[in-house]
Amino acid sequence: MLTLDPSSHLLVLTGAGISAESGVPTFRDAGGLWEGHDVHEVASPEGFARDPLLVWKFYSERRAGMTGVAPNAGHRALVEVERRLGDRFLLVTQNIDGLHAAAGSERIIEIHGNLMRSRCSVCDRAPFADTTAYRAGVAPMCGVCQRAGTDALLRPDIVWFGEPVVADALPRIEAFVARAGKDLRFLAIGTSGLVYPAAGLVDVCRARGGKSWLVNLEPPANAHAFDEVALGKAGDVLPRLLA
Ligand code: OAD
């Protein structure tokens, strides 16, 4: 049981594992997305420059795959704990599927962006909601640039390998950690602990003397860094852990 007292501040990090029970494929598990796709081809700026149609095909399939997908008991357990803690809760997610917001979480930082938004690959127009699964062979163009007489491709509003995480993410996390002080608690769920800076949050918490929990199907790369490890499915473990 993860005990929280009236001054505890809970920083939560989620990865693809929390959405697995909703039917969203993870990346590195057997049969996961990176088994069938080369990450450098579909999730890097270089890959997009080389073959934007391939990248849009990949993310259009991800968008289409979200039809009918709903949050699960793991997402809902985090909504409940946020209701109890209010501003003493912060959820950092690497997931781009939007399921935390769909479940009702409010204090969320999507450090890798959101699948259901697009932005221009050239101009600085604001990212906008876009659920379109583009047809194969169609590369969407930026209407703002077109009106100004130039051609520029739209891209998914997702952070790719080699790109910095969403601009205000780290300052917001740092501010939360500073405010929490000795009352910081950290909980990581469903993430393989391989992709930074997210994988380093447990070390940030340890450096502050905060206690850390991990909920994951299998021990991830950085399991040794946690004080408590609960192996199992997030949808089974979280409702009990956070009760
Ligand atoms: P991974 O696919 O690397 O890891 C998912 C983790 O979830 C694995 O350790 C699984 O054992 C675990 N898992 C699977 N099902 C679970 C369940 N039902 N309950 C609990 N745990 C479960 O996904 P991430 O760690 O999220 O980035 O990957 C991190 C980043 O790398 C992603 O955001 C993505 C990826 O490449 C970009 O695309 C930029």
Image (spheres, helix red, strand yellow):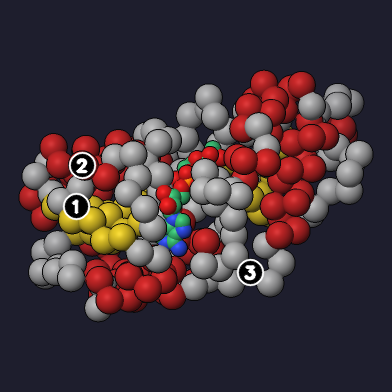
Residue 111 vertical placement versus 40 (above, below): below
Give the label, 3 or 2, closer to the camera.
Answer: 2
Residue 78: image location, x then y, percent? 36, 68
> What percent of the width, then of the height, locates residue 96?
56, 51
**Residue at image mark 2:** 225
Q: Secondary structure at mark 1?
A: strand
Density class for disc 3 (Cα within 10 Å; few <14, some 14-19, many ≥20) is some
> Mark 3 to mark 2: distance in Å?
33 Å
Amino acid type, label 1: Ser
Earlier residue among tags 1 and 3: 3
Quarter residue 175 falls in: top left
**CA gap, disc 1 and disc 3:** 30 Å
Using residue 112 as the reference point, say whether residue 120 is left or right of it: right
Question: Does residue 109 appear in the picture of this structure?
Answer: no
In this rendering, the count of numbered labels is: 3
Q: Amino acid at mark 3?
A: Val
User: Mark on residue 212?
Assistant: 1
Question: In front: 52, or 216?
Answer: 216
